[in-house]
Image (tube, helix red, strand yellow):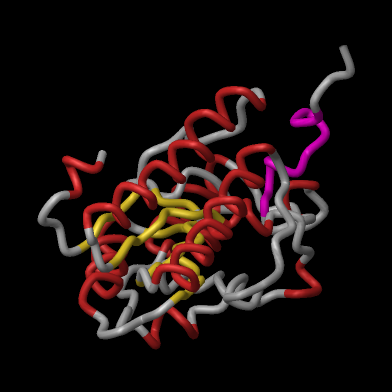
Amino acid sequence: MSAACAGADAVIHLGGIPTEDAWAPILDVNINGTYTVFEAARRAGVKRVVFASSNHAVGFTPPSKFPVADFAFPAPDTYYGASKAAGEALAALYAHRYGLEAICVRILSCFERPGNTRMLSTWLSPDDAGRLFEACLTTPRPGFRVIFGVSANTRGGWVSLGEARALGYEPQDDAEVYAADVLARTEVNPDDPVFRYLGGEFTLPDKDVPIP
């Protein structure tokens, strides 16, 4: 990784296990792997790291606290969410101790198109993701930031876009263009447990770790 970082101005770290898993692989890939990226960047003299965090770092935030503030205290919903909170902590460490510019992007639901009713609120389009990461790379002297990554969805408002917009991000896409298709397959039920917290299905009991 140090060799890969040599001569780079910035690193975008998107690698990792993208969903819940057992603790051992989450620790090895998502936490130790993220440490490896930050440490390699530091050794190579890279000035900026953009880290793909997740809304699951604050997944147990209830709707009563929407829109979730950019720097909301971690409330992870899974081992995966805890690994993203750990990555944010590493970003802060390398920013404050070593002067590395570090931006943590709490991505919501980045897919080609929204696949369910929750994503009508949480969707981040691929094009908006490109705009967001371009803003992260080009904004001058960001220091340490925690921002959210989501499109301009009509049914949005779940999280703040204040810090993202401060970096120059302006979302242009809206999940509502897919609403008719999504709602034809699944009705919106506000009492569905998936809407109880920001983290959606990651907060449900089926993600509980069984007692051996």
Q: Looking at this rendering, what residue extends furthest in the right direction?
A: 211
Foreground pick, 8 / 75: 8
The image quadrant where one finds the C terminus is top right
Q: Looking at this rendering, what residue extends furthest in the top direction?
A: 212
Q: Looking at this rendering, what residue extends furthest in the left direction?
A: 7
Foreground pick, 195 / 130: 130
138 over 199 or under it: above or below: below
Residue in the picture at 37% in, 39% down: 15
Residue in the picture at 62% in, 51% down: 56
111 left or right of 93?
A: left
Tally the marks.
0
The image quadrant where one finds the N terminus is top left
178 over 96 or under it: above or below: above
Foreground pick, 102 / 73: 102
The majority secondary structure of the magenta stretch comes to: helix
Residue in the picture at 40% in, 68% down: 102
Q: Position of residue 184 (x, y in %)?
A: 53, 45
| Membership of 203 in magenta stretch | yes
Q: Which residues are magenta?
A: 199-208
37 left or right of 162?
A: left
190 over 194 or under it: above or below: below
Residue in the picture at 60% in, 51% down: 86
Quadrant of res 208: top right
194 left or right of 83?
A: right
159 left or right of 48?
A: right
Q: Position of residue 19 (x, y in %)?
A: 55, 34
Q: Position of residue 4 (x, y in %)?
A: 17, 42
| Membership of 35 in magenta stretch | no
